[in-house]
Image: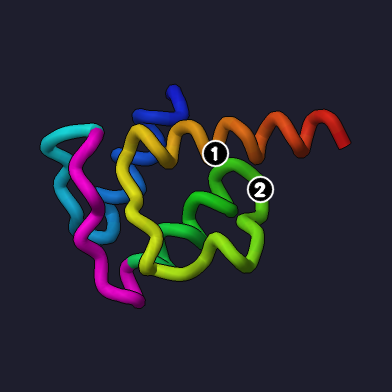
Amino acid sequence: MSIRETIIKLLEEVNFAVVDDDEPFQLDSLGFIAFIVALEDEFDIEFPDDFLGIQNVLTVSSMVVVVGNLLDNCILT
C-alpha cells in the first residue's frame, strides 16, 4: 500500500472522507491527534512537536510529502 493510500485509509478511520487530494482536512482536535498517532504507528515515525498544531493546513498531498520526508530522515539517521 502506498503512502497516499495509507493516509486515505487512516483518514477514513477518523471519519473523514477524502474527495480530493488537495482538500484541507476538516478534523476536530481529537480526530487530528488520532490521525497523527495512527500515522506514527503505521509508518514508525514521529512528527516534530511544532508540526502538531491543528492550525496547519493539511491535505493528502501535503501529508504524502511530510510522511515521505520523515521516512527519508529515519532512514538517513
Whether residue 37 sits left or right of residue 19 in the image: it is right
State the residue at coordinates (51%, 61%).
Answer: 37
Quick check: is 37 in the magenta stretch? no
User: Which stretch did the figure color magenta?
Assistant: 22-31
**In terms of image quadrants, where is residue 7?**
top left
Residue holding disc 2: 45
Q: Quadrant of the N terminus?
A: top left
Rendered residue at 39%/60% (across/down):
56
Crowd rating for badge 1 (residues with CA inside 10 Å; few <14, some 14–19, many 20+): many
- The location of residue 51, given as percent across then percent down, is 55, 60
Of the residues shown, which amino acid type is indicated by label 1? Val
Q: Which residue was labeled with disc 1?
A: 67
Q: Nearer the viewer, residue 15 or 48?
A: 48
Q: Is residue 30 magenta?
A: yes
Residue found farthest to the right? 77
Q: Position of residue 52 (x, y in %)?
A: 52, 66
The local secondary structure at tag 2 comes to loop
* Residue drawn where x is 16% and y is 34% of the image: 20
Tags 2 and 1 in contact by the CB under 8 Å rule? yes
**Local crowd size for mark 2, using a 10 Å CA cut-off: few (<14), some (14–19), many (≥20):** some
The residues tagged by marks 2 and 1 sit, at their Cα atoms, a distance apart of 8 Å
Residue type at the position of mark 2: Ile
Q: Point out residue 5 in the picture as x, y percentages from the top left corner.
A: 35, 29
Single out the mark in the foreground, 2 or 1: 1
Considering the numbered disc 1 on the image, is that residue within a helix, a strand or a loop? helix
